[in-house]
Amino acid sequence: MSIIQFRQTSKHFGALKVLDRVDLTIDEGEVVVLIGPSGSGKSTLLRCINGLETITGGDLIVDGLSVKGGARQLREIRQEAGMVFQQFNLFPQLTALENVAFGPRKVRGLSRAEAQETAIDLLDKVGLAEKANHYPAELSGGQQQRVAIARALAVKPKVMLFDEPTSALDPELKQEVLNVMRRLAAEGMTMVVVTHEMAFAKQVGTRLIFMEHGKIAVDGNPREVIDTPPNARLKDFLQHVE
Amino acid sequence: METDWSVVIDYMPALLAGAKTTIYITVLGLVGGLLLGTIAGLMRAYGGSVLNAIAFAYIELIRGTPIVVQVMFLYFALPVLADIRIDPMSAAVLAIVVNAGAYIAEIVRGAFLSIGKGLSEAGLAIGLPHWKVLLYIVGPLAFRRLIPPLGNQFIVSLKDTSLFIVIGVGELTRTGQEIMASNFRAVEIWSAVAVIYLIMTGSLTLVLRTIERRMKIL
C-alpha cells in the first residue's frame, strides 16, 4: 500500500528549481533514506510531504490526500506525517511531558489525563520517563531530540519524517537518537529520513535515494548502492560523507 | 529665594485628585492601546497584503504626528468634520489608545517575529492550525519579550497625559498649572508635581520588574 506519492512534483523558489518533476512512491513499512549534497533538494522533498513547503508543480498524495487540498486537508496530512527537525524545536516554555502531551491535547482533543498518560508512555519508550518534568533547556541535545521524536509520535502518525535528526548532535549523542529510530523502524513504522549516517542507512534503511539538482539520481537497496555506487557522483559523495 | 513647602501640603488633595485623573486616563488608554496595538501588530506580522497595508497606514499616521496634534484633532476637528462631539476626558483616553496602540503594534510585531520559525513549524507539523500555533506557542514566548519595551511605552504614555493640558483635562499637570496661577509658588508646586510623576512611573517600573522576574525570559 503506497502512503506517499510524488507525481511529477516540482518546487521552485522564484527562479530556483529545487525539485524538478519528481516521481516517487513510498509504501507503508518502508524506511527510505534520503541523501545528497546540500542544495540537492532532499530536505525540501521531505518538507513538501507535510506541506511545510508548498509544491509549485505536479501533485503529492499523502495517505490518500493531496497536499494541495487546502488548509484543513493539510492539517489532516500533518497528523498522519510526524516530523522531527534538525534543531529539535521543542517548545521551550513546556516541560518534556507537556511537549509530548501537547499534540494529543490540542490536535487530537484528548483530555489532560489521557494526554499525559500517552506522553508518559512515549517518554518511557524513548528512555526519558525520569526527565518528564524537565524543561528542554535542562536536557542534552540527544535527550531533546528523543523528546521531539516522542512529541511527533504522540499524534499517532502513520509515517515519520526525519530532517537530519542527528546533524546538530555530538557524535556520542547521535547513537541514542539513532537507537530510538532503529526501534521505531523495527516496529514497522514508515520512515523517510534525510541523514548523512551511512551506517544507519545500511542497517535500517530498506531503500536509499540519492538526490542531485532536484532530481532522484539513484534509487535502490542501501547496501548495494553504498557498497557499489552505480554512479560516479554518488561514489564521490559517499567518500566525502564517510 | 524663599520657599514655603506648606503650600504643597495645602494643595495635596488637589494634586492627588489630578494624579488620579492621570492614572485613570493612562490605565484606560493603555488597556485600549494594548488591544488595538496587538491587533494592528498581528495584522502587520501575519495579515495578508490588505490587512498589512491598513495597519501600516495607521502606524505611520500616528507615529508621524505629535500626540498634541492628535488630541487637538479628536477634540476640536472631529466635531467640525463629522459632527462627533466628545468630552475632554474621552478625547484624552482615546488619544492614548490610538497613540500607544501604534507604538505597541510595532512592539508586538517585533516580539512575535523574533520567535524562531522552527517553533512555528514544529507546531504546524503536529497538525495545529496557524492561529493555535500563535496562541499556544508563539504568543506565550513573545509575551515574555514584550515586557521590557512595553514598560517603556507605558511610562511614555503616562507622561504624555500631561500634554492633555491643551484640551483642559484636569490631570496632574493641569492641576499644578491651576494652583500655580493662584499662588505663584512655582518651585514648590512643580517639585511636588514632578515627585508625584516619579512615584507613578517608579511604581510602574517596580510592577514590570516583578512580572519580569517571575517569568523566565526565553
Image: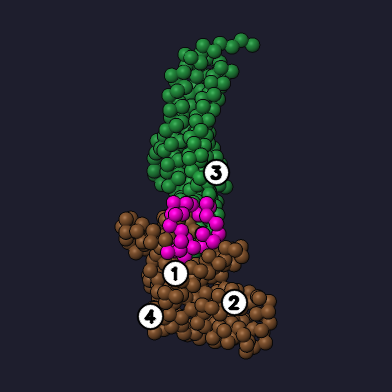
Chain colours: A brown, B green
Residue kind at label 3, given as amino acid type: Pro
Q: Which residue is mark 3?
A: B149
Relative to B78, is A105 on the left or the right? Answer: left
Q: Nearer the viewer, mark 2 or mark 1?
A: 2
Read off the chain for label 3.
B
Alpha carbons under labels 4 and 1: distance apart: 16 Å
Read off the chain for label 2.
A
- Crowd around label 2: few <14 · some 14–19 · many ≥20 (10 Å): some
- What residue is at 58 percent from the left and 87 percent from the top? A224
Which quadrant of the structure image shows residue A28?
Answer: bottom left
Which quadrant of the structure image shows residue A237?
Answer: bottom right
Q: Which residue is mark 2?
A: A198
Alpha carbons under labels 4 and 2: distance apart: 31 Å
The residue segment tinted magenta is A125-150
Q: Which residue is mark 1?
A: A82
- Crowd around label 3: few <14 · some 14–19 · many ≥20 (10 Å): some
Residues beneath discs 4 and 2 located on the same chain: yes
Mark number displayed over residue A64: 4
Read off the chain for label 4.
A
Q: Nearer the viewer, mark 4 or mark 1?
A: 1
Residue B96 magenta: no
Residue A197 visible in the current orientation: yes
Relative to A10, is A39 on the left or the right? Answer: right
Q: Nearer the viewer, residue B64 or A100?
A: A100
Residues beneath discs 3 and 1 located on the same chain: no
